[in-house]
Image: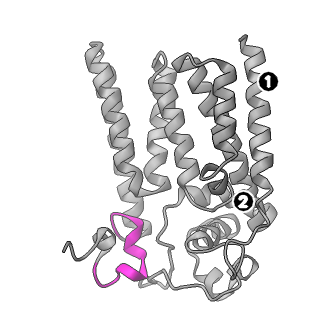
Amino acid sequence: MPDARLRWWLAALALGIAAWTALAVPAHATYGGRTTADEPQYLLSAISLGEDLDLDISDELRDERWRDFHDAELPVQTQPDADGRAMSPHDPLLPAFLAVPVLVGGWAGGKLALAALAGLLAAAIAWVAVRRFAVAPAVAIGVAAAFGAASPLAAYGVQVYPELPAALAVTVAVGALTGPFARRGQLVFAVAIVALPWLAVKYVPVAGALVALALLDRWRRGRRREAGILVGGLALAGVAFVVFHRVVYGGWTVYASGDHFAETGEASVIGVDPD
């Protein structure tokens, strides 16, 4: 299929999946509102970034800004620091992405932005299948459309969680890694990898696996200098991640600011009783 024609089909796929997913924006997530569990926390951080240009949600909590999208009382998740700041124990890249949509369109604007990402994800999956794995365009677009229109992808397309953006980052990384992997491909790969832990620290193992594959590829091809540059760049990104979290959240991860981990420490997010 010619590139121009494929682009039109991919654009139609993205728009179709985004529109289909957006139909669920008004749906209630629970009896107590249109968001539930951790979703209000991400939205409060997005509101704070959009209005105050910081991640301190103490004023949003005080003013009960969650009432627009969560009718029930909001469970306490934050542990205020010595200065009274309350940082939600959730990684900041998703709120940063949602800040402008939420500022412009409220909680619905944030969910519509995620629906648009769902469309981009479907198009990215189809493109990678066609251009990197030689799948027939009709098959790739049909399968991407089927999965994009069904659960879990369609459901996550209107839920304020990092899973769908992370899926897009992984798809982009795979597309870059399986391509020519020249300078532009390496840059795209690095950006996608760096995004993963900022979406959620739980994606660090996923990022590590992709980086290991990239380094193995460079090593086998004798391009060890490129491997070294990739390692150095990602190491600098890792240092920036740690410094930011130490300064903003007071620990190695966002969990340092969590009320649930105040007594047991942020590492207890993986459990406190192995038996």
Which residue is at the front of the view, 268 or 236? 268
- The reply to whether residue 62 is visible in this rendering is yes
Q: Residue 65: where, in percent of width, then height?
A: 70, 81
Figure quadrant of the C terminus: bottom left
Q: Which residues are magenta?
A: 251-264
Identity of the residue drawn at 69% across and 64% down: 50
Residue 111 — which label? 2
| Residue 228, picture quadrant | top left
Residue 259 part of the magenta-drawn span: yes
Q: Is residue 213 above or below residue 166?
A: above
- The reply to whether residue 229 is visible in this rendering is no
Question: Which sits earlier in the primary sequence, circle 2 or circle 1?
Answer: 1
Q: Residue 47: where, in percent of width, then height?
A: 68, 69
| Residue 64, picture quadrant | bottom right
Residue denoted by label 1: 8
Q: Residues within 10 Å of mark 2 (few under 14, many from 20)?
A: many
Task: Check disc 2 and report its element: helix, strand or loop.
Answer: helix
